[in-house]
Image: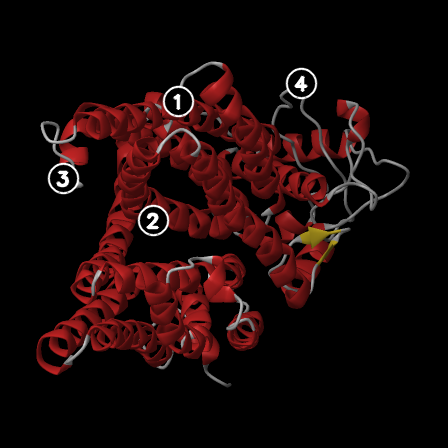
């Protein structure tokens, strides 16, 4: 189709509304496509500056789908048919309160920043980072806090219930880390690219991600439910020697397995919202579910006499409520979204896309296996220092991971914004996003290190009153402090790799770093360590190498010509 013909079009056709099934159109000047209001034909008003950001984002998606549908009809028709479509579009042109927003203006606004669309313009990169990272941080922090509260309730039953639930949760965490978290990361990048690219089908990308998540969740439920006895046995619990602990752990794991589809669905929908640049909705869903869980768990545990199983049922129920809420919001706000249609309409097409998503997810699953394996080896080696110092290592390990939550949220912002900027080929935004997120990460890590150092006299006592454990914590805290800036920037740079869809290199980085880290631990413990404290030192030298290598290997990647984002970093 010629450029002259395209410039003459003054309207577009909106996909059928879910509520009325009626089509509508919009208007523009003779030199641009319309994204104006079409409230008269649907009974729906154009979002105003007082509307929520998500409503305005939904309106933007509807307008884009309208334009895509119009051009597909024009490109497939004859000359007379094209003129007929244009004539009908012009005849149906209506605007709300005389407001007409042209596509040309929207394109100019969208190039100013890859951030969220607000009031017909785009947020600055600084505002976009804050808008995405802060809700993501609270969402990431909500689950660990709720788990601690759950553990407190279960601990009031007896020690066996607490130990059994801990074993079952450890199995579930491994499954989430290896299989579900990679799908979350891949979905975020896919949706972020589809959101800003007219050439990509956003509704189809979201639908296939959800369908794949549901299939994966169902498979995990079967494997966990059937394999629960074997998995608990692998965790070191013998059914003959400790039957009460064994059966309690198996029962807890099987109940939680029933919620696996909801857990995968929750993570997948979170990936969709992250890709759209909206981390508030997942935060609201996570917060609401966890608050309900905290109130429901003691009711089922004590009032209904379900014991540890009551806590498991409460978690499962709240996971389904949160996941279905987010799924409903996706359905209402992404035009053309449906579940099951891709499988039924074209199995081959679905299989091709699913294979691509699973292939990338498997690469990230290997990456997760490397990091989980490194932490498991470190925990095993810490036992060589004795139970008290091993407990000190576990405390510092959890503190170290907990302090990275904000850096992890910053990585989410880097991934989303960078994926959008690269898709739009906005070199200035690519450079600005990388520079600013890394800068904020460095500041964040430095501030966290100072806070941990300042609380050195109080922090250890919050975890234990055992003198040997406290001595071990005080010995390891300097390592926790020193590694904070390095760890924070390394996490952010992981987001950069994900935003550039450089998943394969991310896995290679983690594998190389894990090999060096575990090698340093093994050599130090077997050939250098002369005391129990030297054992801990060898482990944390390995942790330091793990993060330092990740940092410098990713920085090296940014200089490589074959890096997918290298061309945007070269000064012209």
Instruction: Residue at 41%, 35% (x, y): give it.
Output: 155
**Disc on res. 234:** 3
- For the residues labelled 4 and 2, say whether their Cβ atoms are less than 8 Å apart: no
Q: CA distance from mark 1 to mark 3?
A: 24 Å
Residue at numbered disc 1: 307
Instruction: Give coordinates of residue 356: x percent, y percent.
Output: 28, 45
Residue at numbered disc 2: 182
SS label for mark 4: loop
Q: How many marks?
A: 4
Indicate which label's residue lies in the foreground, 3 or 4: 3
SS label for mark 1: loop
Residue 1 to residue 410: above or below: above
Instruction: Give coordinates of residue 296: x percent, y percent.
Output: 54, 24
Number of other residues with Cα within 10 Å of mark 2, as a class: few under 14, some 14 to 19, many 20 or more: many
Residue at numbered disc 4: 19
Residue sticking out furthest to the bottom: 572
């Amino acid at each position: 189709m010629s450029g002259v013909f395209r410039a003459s079009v003054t309207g577009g056709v909106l996909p059928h509304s879910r509520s009325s099934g009626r089509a509508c159109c919009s208007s523009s000047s003779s030199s641009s496509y319309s994204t104006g209001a079409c409230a008269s034909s649907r009974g729906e008003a154009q979002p105003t500056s007082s509307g929520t950001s998500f409503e305005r984002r939904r309106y933007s998606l509807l307008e884009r789908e309208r334009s895509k549908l119009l051009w597909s009809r024009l490109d497939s028709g004859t000359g007379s048919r094209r003129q007929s479509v244009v004539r009908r579009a012009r005849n149906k042109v209506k605007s709300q309160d005389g407001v007409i927003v042209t596509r040309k203006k929207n394109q100019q606004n969208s190039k100013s920043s890859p951030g969220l669309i607000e009031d017909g313009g785009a947020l600055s990169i600084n505002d976009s980072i804050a808008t995405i990272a802060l809700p993501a941080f609270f969402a990431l922090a909500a689950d660990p806090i709720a788990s601690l509260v759950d553990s407190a309730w279960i601990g009031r039953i007896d020690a066996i219930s607490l130990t059994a639930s801990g074993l079952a949760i450890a199995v579930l965490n491994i499954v989430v880390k290896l299989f579900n978290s990679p799908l979350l990361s891949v979905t975020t990048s896919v949706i972020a690219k589809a959101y800003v690219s007219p050439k990509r089908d956003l509704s189809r990308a979201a639908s296939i991600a959800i369908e794949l998540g549901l299939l994966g969740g169902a498979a995990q439920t079967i494997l966990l439910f059937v394999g629960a006895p074997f998995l608990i046995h692998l965790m070191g619990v013998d059914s003959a020697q400790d039957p009460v602990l064994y059966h309690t752990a198996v029962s807890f794991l099987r109940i939680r397995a029933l919620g696996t589809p909801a857990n995968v669905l929750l993570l997948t929908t979170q990936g969709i919202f992250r890709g759209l640049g909206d981390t508030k909705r997942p935060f609201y869903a996570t917060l609401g579910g966890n608050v309900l869980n905290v109130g429901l768990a003691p009711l089922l545990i004590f009032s209904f006499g379900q014991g540890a199983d009551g806590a498991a049922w409460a978690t499962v129920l709240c996971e389904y409520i949160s996941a279905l809420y987010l799924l409903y919001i996706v359905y209402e706000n992404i035009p053309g979204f449906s579940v099951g249609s891709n499988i039924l309409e074209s199995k081959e097409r679905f299989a091709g896309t699913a294979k691509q998503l699973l292939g990338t997810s498997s690469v990230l699953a290997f990456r997760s296996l490397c990091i989980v394996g490194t932490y498991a080896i470190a925990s095993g080696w810490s036992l060589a220092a004795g139970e008290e110092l091993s407990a000190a290592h576990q405390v510092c390990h959890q503190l170290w991971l907990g302090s990275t939550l904000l850096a992890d949220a910053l990585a989410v912002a880097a991934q989303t914004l960078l994926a959008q900027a690269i898709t739009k080929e906005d070199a200035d935004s690519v450079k600005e996003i990388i520079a600013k997120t890394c800068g904020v990460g460095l500041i964040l890590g430095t501030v966290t290190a100072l806070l941990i150092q300042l609380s050195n006299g109080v922090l250890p006592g919050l975890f234990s009153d055992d003198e040997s454990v406290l001595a071990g914590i005080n010995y390891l805290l300097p390592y926790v402090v020193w590694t904070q800036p390095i760890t924070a920037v390394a996490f952010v740079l992981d987001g950069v790799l994900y935003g550039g869809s450089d998943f394969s290199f991310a896995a290679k980085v983690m594998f190389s770093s894990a090999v060096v880290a575990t090698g340093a631990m093994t050599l130090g413990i077997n050939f250098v360590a002369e005391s129990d404290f030297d054992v801990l030192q060898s482990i944390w030298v390995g942790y330091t190498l793990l993060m330092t290598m990740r940092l410098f290997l990713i920085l090296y990647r940014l200089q490589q010509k074959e890096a997918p984002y290298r061309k945007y970093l070269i000064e012209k």
